[in-house]
Image (cartoon, helix red, strand yellow):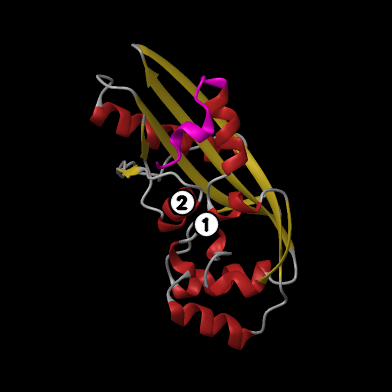
Amino acid sequence: MRLILASASPARLQTLRAAGVDPIVQVSGVDEDGVEADRPEGLASELARLKAEAVLAEVGTAEDTIVLGCDSLLVLDGQVHGKPHTDEAVRARWELMRGRTGRLITGHHVVVVRDGGIHRDTRAATTDVTFADVTDDEVDAYIATGEPHHCAGAFTIDGFGGAFVERLAGDHHNVVGLSLPLLRHMLADAGVAWPSLWRR
């Protein structure tokens, strides 16, 4: 079966490729602004659902397909933080994060189209992330890389920001933006064995 990743994230694509899966990337174009939910897990899951369903509407259901949508956000002090985009926002975010622990939540939405049937599943994974007590100079240097501007929580664990993450409690893949163990369970519940997706 073809697997379509409804995400522009290079980290999600690399995570799947490293796990032996070669997805087709098709970005949804969903406008994330204005989407609301009662809880952070609900927000991440709803954004993931919107992305996957938008791509499904584009590719159709004529052939067997898996569409995967994901969305990540960081929760700190009960506040939800997405991509900061600007230098000032990154600096402010790290003022809050350094030396503390936040919750990285990734929503996953899977649509499996097979033999004329459609199976849908939406779940969220949570990982606690403890950040280093970084200096102002380290934050400025990190900003200069351009990396944190387009990442949920203003950091990555698989790039320049990896040295600023002290500890994780939970699935480390989830912090990259895609929980492989959760995806395996979701696909198994749809009757798709994870090894069947491995490249031959």
Secondary structure beneath dot 1 equals helix
Instruction: Confirm or deny contact between disc 1 and disc 2 (CB under 8 A).
Output: no
Q: Position of residue 15 (x, y in %)?
A: 49, 52
Mark closer to the chain start, 1 or 2? 2
- The disc labelled 1 sits on which kind of residue? Ala
Compute the Cα span from label 1 to label 2.
Answer: 13 Å
Secondary structure beneath dot 2 equals helix
Q: Position of residue 67 (x, y in %)?
A: 39, 32
In the displayed structure, would residue 138 be above or below residue 30? below
- Please tell me which residue lies in front, 164 or 25: 25
Which residue shows up at 36% across the image and 29% down it?
Answer: 1
Residue 29 sits in quarter: top left
Residue 197 lies in the magenta-colored region: yes
Residue 53 sits in quarter: top left
Residue 129 sits in quarter: bottom right
Q: Position of residue 126 (x, y in %)?
A: 66, 44
- The disc labelled 2 sits on which kind of residue? Arg
In the displayed structure, would residue 97 be above or below residue 115? below
Q: Which residue is mark 2?
A: 12
Q: Nearer the viewer, mark 1 or mark 2?
A: 2
Q: Position of residue 146 (x, y in %)?
A: 42, 74
Residue 23 lies in the magenta-colored region: no
Residue 168 relative to residue 185: left or right: right
Q: Which mark is residue 152?
A: 1
Write the start and end of the magenta stretch as one range. 189-200
Which residue shows up at 56% across the image and 28% down it?
Answer: 186
